Image: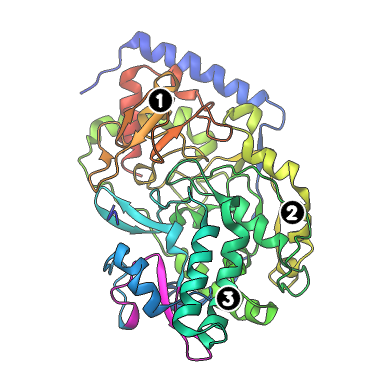
Amino acid sequence: MLKKTFVLGSIFLFLLIELSCKKEEIIEDCTDCRTFIPASSQRTGDAEKGKNYLSYGDFVDSGIPSDLFNSTLGLFLGKDNSLQRTGINQDLNFAYTRFINKDGVDLIAPNCYQCHAGYVDGKFMIGLGNTFADFTGNQAAFAGILDQAVAARYGQNSKEMTAYAPFSRAVKVLGDKLSTQTVGSNSADKLALVLAAHRKQDDLTWQETPSFAIPQSVYPVDVPAWWLLKKKNAMFHTAEGRGDFARLMMASSLLTLQDTVKARSVDQNFKDVLAYLLTLTPPKYTGTIDQSLASTGKTLFLKNCAKCHGENEGPNSYPNFLVSQKEVGTDPSVIEFYKNNQAFTTWYNGSWFSKNPFGANLTPGDGYVAPPLDGIWASAPYFHNGSVPTLADILNSKNRPVYWQKANNPNNYDHQKMGLKYEVTTAKTDPYTFDTTIKGYSNQGHTYGDILNSNEKLAIIEYLKTL
């Protein structure tokens, strides 16, 4: 397991001011290109309890019997105490949690850290999107083999099989419906849709026949860093997550929960989880920073970038804008996903999740949230689909690689280009190769940095190290 002095010439400065002013005028005059996202009231909770629940809680309350897990997947994963857990979880990989269920069965199940923790520049970070989580395979075949192993070891009518069954059922339904093209690409939107289709709206009990059509398409998303949540008025890339954030997040338990009785229990704990997430701070850059150059970069950033991404200083420095796809120009597939699958949002907005008090809703916009940039150095790759490996490539659209293979080793950070180390290839060669020619994986759009000269780009990158 991966532990995963420039002087601006007056002529360049003059051209920069001219070009950036023109760009600002375009944004100002553009009709509905930026939409303010209003805030929603949020519950308060106990941050320490929330941290404990994320590490030890049974919000996914079905899984693989522990001794079977340890003799199979556990051997592959090895010992890992990145979360500094104690007790029966002490040596378990951070992406899994071990717990004893109400019937005394010892189980191991995936947890939130499977997608929301990882390594960058050799350092483990809670709340970082896991760019090495692998969703490229078909999990249904694995579930079938596991079914046989559980039955053979414990018996078809055993309490272990009963405890394992909801997990198996979900994995089989998800099957190849979540398969992405690249390791690190996340299929969270499709996951939510599939699980919702197999749940009744009112009591969330399981139904074998989906209540609405499930599309074949799987479009990747890059997992946003948890430490950004304290600034945001909506969750997720198209601002679809509105209302109570704790209610939105606890939907991860749909994987295995039996009904709304369990849902209410999980929901009460997730107000504490939210409180914990709001305490997270962005990681400090681990390399060196040229403060003089960063100061120049700050001036350029405030002139060219802060209108959408915020000034990063003061309590009201983040504007919370949804920027239209027409304006930003990035891959439209995730937006199209919600437009073409309105039965999913209708299901959610009429389900138990939307009920007051503490109701949540899915209201996807026709664009993408311009995110806060706190800790941006650590959260490569970039764009909502993770199609751009470095900040240098963000600021120079012509240099973005069509095919790029990220380094699969602990020293995977590029301090010069600021992002993931990668090699340019001429085709997709393996699951670690990102192919931007595939629908949903495009690196198009957000070409604002192209108006800057090379020194100005370096200065902005230096400033971004400080956030």
**Badge 2 is on which residue?**
345
- Would you say the residues marked 2 and 1 are in contact, meaning their CB atoms lie under 8 Å apart? no
Res. 165 mark: 3
Kind of residue at disc 3:
Ala
Above or below, 279 against 64 in this view is above
Residue 208, given in percent of the width and then of the height, sits at 72, 66
Magenta region includes residue 263: no
Chain-order first, disc 2 or disc 1: 2
Chain-order first, disc 2 or disc 3: 3
Label 2: how many Cα within 10 Å (few below 14, some 14–19, many 20+) = some
> Which segment is the magenta one?
88-108
Q: Who's the residue at 55% across and 52% down the image?
A: 232
The colour scheme used here is rainbow
Asked if residue 185 can be seen in this view, the reply is yes
Residue 79, given in percent of the width and then of the height, sits at 26, 69
Above or below, 134 against 202 in this view is above
Label 3: how many Cα within 10 Å (few below 14, some 14–19, many 20+) = some
Magenta region includes residue 97: yes
Above or below, 246 against 368 in this view is below
Above or below, 399 against 237 in this view is above
**Badge 1 is on which residue?**
401
SS of the residue at dot 2? Answer: helix
* Image quadrant occupied by the N terminus: bottom left
* Image quadrant occupied by the C terminus: top left
SS of the residue at dot 3? Answer: helix
Q: Is residue 196 left or right of residue 147?
A: right
- Given residues 6 and 253, the one toward you in this image is 253
**Disc 1 to disc 3, how far (Cα)?**
44 Å
Q: Is residue 3 left or right of residue 438?
A: left
Mark 2, mark 3: which one is toward the viewer? 3
Residue 135, given in percent of the width and then of the height, sits at 48, 51
- Quarter residue 31 falls in: top right
